[in-house]
Image: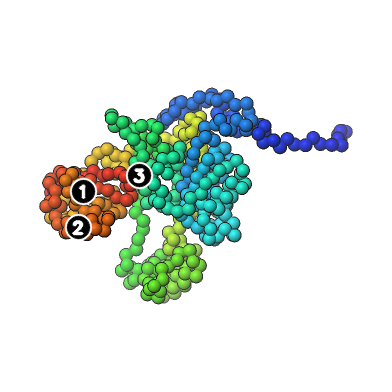
Amino acid sequence: MDIEKTSSVEPMDTDTTQAPTRGSLLTLMSRSSRFANETGELPIGEFEPKAFNGTTADLPDSALTQSKILVVGAGGLGCEILKDLAMSGMPNVHVIDLDNIDVTNLNRQFLFRQKDVGSSKAKVAADFINTRCPWMKVVPHHGKIQDKNPSFYKSFNVIISGLDNVEARRWLNATVVGLVDMDEDGDPDPSTIIPIIDGGTEGFSGQARVILPRITSCFECSLDAFPPQRSFPLCTIAETPRRPEHCIAYAFILEWPKQFPEQKLDKDSPDDMKWVYEKALERAKKYNIEGVTYMFTMGVVKTIIPAVASTNAIVSATCVNEAVKLLTFCSQTLNTYMMYMGAEGVYSHTFVYERKLDCAVSGKETHKIELSKEATLNELIQMLKEGSLRLGMPSMTTADKTLYMQKPPALEKATRKNLDKPVSSLIDADEEIVVTDPVLQSINLSVAISFQ
């Protein structure tokens, strides 16, 4: 067969404003859907197809480009989320993260390079995305999420969380739930509801969750599913170590303060971590305990959760997919939880996380606690900290008196005398106490005390 040869080739059209977008999200949003949002188990809006002419010039008119999105965390999940947002045509993004880049991040957090070690995760991630994807406008924020006031979070249409610890997620959850305004009938004002899409991974397992504050269950409703952070008794660490974690804890909890009383352990310092590792290994050999390695030492000291890149990719894609559906109503919203179990194959399932009626954040019921008449206020505080509520620094007032306030120092000193008094001498039976706590933000918890 003869093949006709041409002496010249037509140049490729590089005008991206007129490039065809067949198969893009524009195509999805321009056609009627049999699975539109209003047909799902968690309907939040009615899908109305929008006429597009099939070019990226239509993007400015898309709900995706007009919305403002906050990504919380720029680690393993955060990097993947930022990439997926860029590929989904959602340019108005802010990202916040407290951490700096460590060399151990480079194997899975693909927006960072060796030269970036020591720099802000949020800033480097934003610069990388903005440079590689010119249509993106990622704004970085380096610092704690707690340093931002509620008005900052109120400015976003969707918040995607890639946090790696329970306490920060509780704080974010309480903050966003507290932004919802309620009408005279006690119903939430839809215009003040900011959806949270919470993602998390651990090894080959992961989860994605949609939280509609005051409508679905919130993160606090499922707090029982997260066991308290593991700690080690000092007597075990000092006298009868049995596991490699005990040896490592002995090195950085007991030995470091003795050796360096004026110097705080820097968990990001290779020299400090090497010292801890060597001391832990020395103690492990003394007690014939195996398993102390440098990487394991870092995991115990920094409470590092094992991460797998493929799990991060799957969970982040699920989170961004839910963001697209929440903003455009083009498909059914997840109701409300997706669990991914990669260790068992590419397997996942969904279920509804029900609201907890006595939830400290989104519940409406008064939390009831029974005490003996001799129980002191300090014992009640310990119950609030160690019980199902897992509060951090609870302060308590009644309708007409202040029982105890953690801050400011002057008020704490003035109310400290109540700590050793029986609660029965401070309040009447079944009298309600208003409890506030930093983890609850602006949420006030109502507690009714009854005496045995």
Q: Mark 3, residues whose alpha carbon is within 10 Å: few (<14), some, or many (≥20)? A: many
The Cα atoms of the two marked residues, 2 and 3, are separated by 29 Å
The structure residue drawn at horizontal position 62% and vertical position 33%, both measured from the top left corner, is 56
The residue depicted at 44 percent of the width and 35 percent of the height is 334
What residue is shown with label 2? 414
* Three-letter residue code for mark 1: Thr
Q: Is residue 372 left or right of residue 10?
A: left
Q: What number is the disc on residue 182?
A: none
Q: Residue at x 50, y 36 (%)?
A: 67
Name which of mark 3 and mark 1 comes first in the sequence: 3
Q: Which residue is more in the foreground, 13 or 284? A: 13
| Mark 1 secondary-structure assignment | strand
| Among the 4 quarters of the image, the one containing residue 377 | bottom left
Q: Quote the CA–CA distance across marks 3 and 1.
A: 20 Å
Q: Which mark is residue 397?
A: 1
Residue 177 x %, y %: 35, 40
The disc label shown at residue 174, or none: 3
First reached walking from the N terminus: tag 2 or tag 3:
3
Q: Is residue 149 left or right of residue 357?
A: right
